[in-house]
Amino acid sequence: MRVDLFDFDLPEDSIALRPVTPREAARLLVVRPGAHTPYEDLTVGDLPSLLRPGDALVFNDTRVIPAQLEGVRRREGAGGQRVSATLHMRVAADRWKAFAKPGKRIKAGDRILFGEDLAARVEDKGEGGEVTLHFDAAGPALDRAIAAVGHIPLPPYIASKREDDEADRRDYQTIYAREEGAVAAPTAGLHFTDALFERLDALGVERHFVTLHVGAGTFLPVKAEDTADHIMHEEIGHVPHETAIALNAARARGGRIVSVGTTSLRLLESAADEDGTIRPWSGATGIFITPGYRFRTADMLMTNFHLPKSTLFMLVSAFSGLETMRGAYAHAIETGYRFYSYGDSSLLFRDDR
């Protein structure tokens, strides 16, 4: 499909730079494809009224690490040069893939000092500024060193407008985050509070967890003119045995699967058989979902509002229909919804027409 089909104009003042407080006070646009009134304006706190006992929410429990590193490149015969590196996938105890700037000047063999206690050698260099960094430290020692000097890697559309601060270490993390490794938050989950969980529990809605370590590739624009020519960056994920069993059981008794976030949905689809049976699964997924894809798992998708021409807007267009989502986004912009990571949310029903 042509990538420009997924383009739209977004005013700068629609981009949220901070989250609302409390988190569940964020607005929620309910989208029902094919309904007489396809759009309904609510808040995230109204979510229990849209669900029923036996439904199953699926959350991504990945935890964001301070993966934005600033350092100085050292090379024999050359002076130091400032380097910025955004870690996006761990490939070994002492190695990370990263997007580095200025990418064109970095070469394999360069040594980068990120502080007194953190240094790495550029092991190899790929396209688009991607490098593999071989750190001097490994395992927990490397994790501690990164945590000490790293910054929360705010999305470019926020980072270009303000510096990260201590509030972001709290705000850019779900309350249930536990598996360290993401460099971007699964932002649909940022809206949940303990109080909202209590109301969902009282209703009889189940909570289940998967892990997908969101990479910086999620922010990369689609530069191809056709979706067939775009290559997704892979991300590491895991569907536990107990989650697969519980979700299959929920569906068998008539419950609906509600994916909280596109990351949870991409992982469920990676783990599903053709008949929709969800299997325990671990590995790297580069699944790229565009209109025409037949979903096998989730009945509903809760997700924030995404970038024009992004792979995530393509995914939601596949889930609820391109024209439906173009209309939904036009409605959201006109009525003042806040966009992107710290913005408002939507609850999408799947279009099976």
Image (cartoon, rainbow, N blue to C red):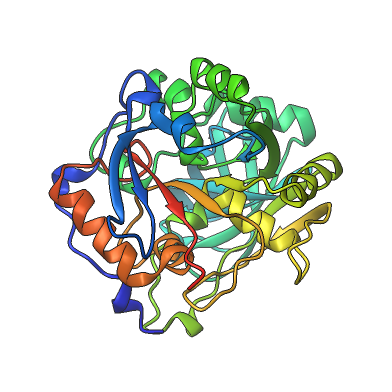
Q: Nearer the viewer, residue 235 or 72?
A: 235
Q: Nearer the viewer, residue 169 or 311?
A: 311
- Which residue is pictured at 50% across the width and 50% down the height? 301
Q: Picture quarter containing residue 250? A: top right
Q: What is the number of callouts on the image? A: 0
Q: Position of residue 255 (x, y in %)?
A: 66, 45
Res. 347 visible in picture: yes
Q: Nearer the viewer, residue 234 or 276?
A: 276
Q: Position of residue 262 (x, y in %)?
A: 52, 52
- Which residue is pictured at 38% across the width and 74% down the height? 223
Where 314 sits versus 247, above or below? below
Residue 222 is left or right of residue 275, and the answer is left
Where 110 sits versus 294, above or below? above
Q: Nearer the viewer, residue 236 or 293?
A: 293
Q: If the image is split into quadrants, where does the N terminus sit?
A: bottom left
Residue 276 is left or right of residue 79, and the answer is right
Residue 162 is left or right of residue 176, and the answer is left
Where 248 sits versus 311, above or below? above
- Which residue is pictured at 27% across the width and 70% down the height? 7
- Which residue is pictured at 14% across the width and 43% down the height? 13
Res. 151 visible in picture: no
Q: Position of residue 137 (x, y in %)?
A: 74, 35
Residue 286 is left or right of residue 229, and the answer is right
Where 49 sits versus 305, above or below? above
Q: Position of residue 198 (x, y in %)?
A: 57, 17
Q: Picture quarter containing residue 18? A: top left
Q: Picture quarter containing residue 112? A: top right
